[in-house]
Image (tube, rainbow, N blue to C red):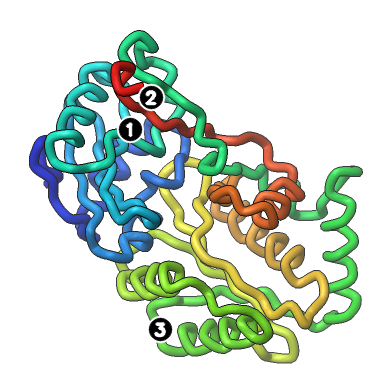
Amino acid sequence: MIAEFPDFKKIEVSDKEEIDAYTKEYPPYSDFEFGSLWAWDVKEEMAISILNGNLVVKFTDYTTGKPFLAFLGKNMVNETAGALLSYSVQNGFEETMHLIPETVAKHLDRDLFLVEESRDHFDYVCDINYHIEYPGKNLKSQRNLLKVFKDTSPDFEQVSLKMETKEAQQEVASVLRRWTEGKEFISDSEAFAYERFVSAAESLSYSAVGIRVAGELVAFHIVSLPPGNCANALFGKADTAYRGVYAALDHVVARDLIERNYTHMNIQQDLGIDSLRAAKLSLHPSHLLKKYSVSSAEKG
């Protein structure tokens, strides 16, 4: 059971059902989705609590190393925000809350709190029906890349991967090795997040699909499957020696998710990285999930 604030407990796989019960009532913000929470707790410092019926999460800032708080809920939001900011000051946390969903921020009293958009942390949500054939002018480049891939790799095969098995892990490891050739390796944080996911895959709700060409895995994508109709992207890599492979990967992921009755996929935030923002915008997401930083108006 999740602790009542001001107590916190570290995240465990057994918390999934309880966290899902809180998050399913709200838009699918990636930061609060259980699969993401579990995988990205790479320092094992993340913790959760309940305050006024709202879900509170203690994150750690990767740059400063200092913890900060965020919460999701609709109950007594001004009182909750005030209590969390006071706790942050008293315990040496960052004096600003981050990753506050718009569904919370819009109810905060601007006379009490300084509320600022965090554009680098907006989630991109795609309508995956548009990733089947990439119709229209906006998606012409993806449509062309998918055609190139199909023309040059006509024997490609869409496969499902069971990430709790050694066979799937070895195939994915091979893709990761090829992906890193000629570029820096994936960050330590992403590598640890992937390992955490794999360690608990048997207990998580997920789908992992891949593309094989001539019997060899050349791309994979893992998504978390929370309640509702929006999947949450976690990890995806491909051997770019195969032109158009990422367009093909999005295509097979969409086919898989639609069969599972999902209509959208949260492809998460761009962290202010220009190339990542351009790549996500090129998919013409259906909408963005806005997030905010919140501090005391007196501090501001």
Indicate the quadrant where residue 217 lies: bottom right
Q: Percent x, y for residue 174?
A: 57, 89
Residue at horizontal 47 percent and vertical 26 percent from the top: 116
Residue type indicated by callout 3:
Thr
Up the image or down, 252 lies above or below 97; here it is below
Mark 2 or mark 3, whichever is nearer to me = 2
**40 sits left or right of 186 in the view:** left
The tag earlier along the polypeptide, 2 or 3, is: 2
Q: Nearer the viewer, residue 59 or 37?
A: 59
Residue at the image point whose x is 32% and y is 44% from the top? 20
- Inspect the image, locate mark 2, and give the three-letter code of the amino acid beneath it: Val
- Does any portion of residue 280 appear in the rendered image? yes
Question: Would you name the residue on which mark 2 appears?
Answer: 104
At a point 61% along the width and 72% down the height, the residue shown is 237
Of badges 3 and 1, nearer the viewer stands 1
Q: Position of residue 262 (x, y in %)?
A: 56, 47
Q: Nearer the viewer, residue 137 or 154?
A: 137
Q: Are marks 3 and 1 in contact (CB under 8 Å)?
A: no
Q: Which residue is mark 3?
A: 165
Query: What label does residue 72 carry, if any?
Result: 1
**Element carrying mark 2:** helix
| Neighbours of disc 2 within 10 Å: few (<14), some (14-19), many (20+) | some
Counting from the top left corner in percent of width and height, residue 119 is at 56, 37
Please determine whether, in this image, residue 245 is positioned above or below residue 215: above
Q: Residue furthest front?
A: 299
Q: Name the residue located 45 percent from the left edge and 57 percent from the top edge.
A: 224
